[in-house]
Image (cartoon, helix red, strand yellow):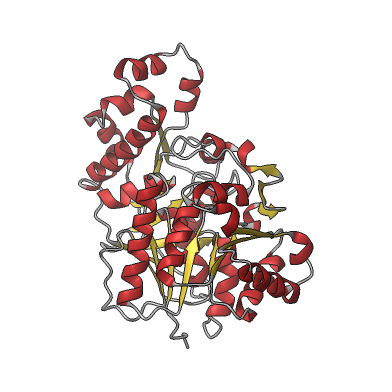
Amino acid sequence: MLTPNTIVVIADDLTGANDTALQFFAKGAVTEILLDYNKMPIKNMQIDVWAVSTESRNKDPEEAYIRTEEAYTLFKNKLNVDYFYKKLDSTLRGNIGQEIMAALKITEKDCAIVAPAFVQEGRITIGGYQLLKGVPIERTEAARDPHVPVFESSIPNILKKQIPNGEELVGLIDFSIVSKGAAPLVLKINELIKQGKKLIVVDAVSVVDMEQIVLAIKKSNYDILPCGSAGLAQAFAKDWLQETKPQNIKKTVPPLPKLILSGSATELSALQLKKVQEDDDIENTYFISLKTEDILEGVSKNIINRVVSNLQKTNIVAVHVSDINVELEDEHSRANELLIDQGITKDELASRITKYLATLAQKVKQERDFALITIGGETSYKCCEALYYDNLQVIDIVLPAIPLCMSSNAQLVITKSGNLGTPTTLLEILKYFERHE
């Protein structure tokens, strides 16, 4: 029997909302993801977990604060919420400080515990520093994000710079305390709150650490807002949904062609696509590598025809931008000349890429039905928006951080962050379809 608890997850991008919602679905909760927090179908009272993206990661700090404030206000006023969870990017991108402060204001919590580690994906916090597979975040591809580059690996330092009076409001609990378990952790949390700390960063290098953080929050005398990645959400799902049962019904999906739209320029995304191309077990694949010139010209009839003509039966068509970074590495390339001539920055080019892929999805949908696989947070949101999805419902677990969703107009959708997973993640997604069709 499902618990009557209502849980609300607020994320700053769609892939973050999805991978966090999945952690609660895995415990048996009925989970709904909203693309627009202003379109909440509150009459559906069968929903246990609501997840929403404010799409504020790439916005300026003031707008990010306002969007987060609005989302929390709407849910607080319209639903009897038992638990709020603030989803943070585990690579520290976005306006994390401003959004936590907005969440604290509306929920009226005593403080926020900030634990963005996602140890299952190799992202840990030690000494307040965020590491990805042992490398400080500022030395990974997150530092080259075209919209929100990360120049700092110290979470406390990032937060102090993002919020007013940061030096007084931000605290840290390092691993020397976390490693001793929940009891010392509770004492330290209580001590920091008494000192006036509102954002308390907590180290975590294992799943056990996450579980101890959850236990400490539960035992604290204070009302605390948990803020973290899908990793911390997984630990909270065990506590908040104790009466639920894991999803264990094998799903079947209709045999549809798969359209992969990748707006991610990360090396990992490129490698994931390459693994699919090289795999002998995956047949009937067709790849279209977009160039900078294609993006600037807009979606052509030729591209639409190439996609539609190959999007047959259970074929796979992948449209991606993995080669654009290679083009732009040469300062004297035609791609760079085009950007200079038209006065377009790399940030603006990234926005044009997502718009291009969203338009392509819309045009192709007019002629073909397909299962949609998107790579990249903004790409995922823009494509879903272009296809008029108001919400997504999680219906199965593809991989531990990747859900299969059904859109509001009954289309299968899988979204994936550009820097999530291993080199074989996309291959495993496609093999999921093979096993379940």
Q: Is 89 on the left or on the right of 415, as rendered? A: right
In this rendering, does residue 315 appear at all? no
Q: Nearer the viewer, residue 206 or 293?
A: 206
Residue at horizontal 24%, vertical 55%?
388
Q: Nearer the viewer, residue 150 or 232?
A: 150
Residue at horizontal 48%, vertical 14%?
331
Number of marks in picture: 0
Q: Nearer the viewer, residue 297 or 217?
A: 217
Q: Identify the residue at the far top of this view.
A: 332
Quadrant of the rendered image containing residue 77: bottom left
x, y percent for residue 307: 31, 37
x, y percent for residue 203: 69, 59
In this rendering, does residue 229 appear at all? yes
Quadrant of the rendered image containing residue 182: bottom right
Quadrant of the rendered image containing residue 311: top left
Q: Indicate the quadrant containing the C terminus: top left, top right, bottom left or bottom right.
A: bottom left
x, y percent for residue 108: 45, 72
Q: Is residue 84 above or below residue 130?
A: below
Q: Nearer the viewer, residue 77 or 214?
A: 77
x, y percent for residue 380: 38, 49
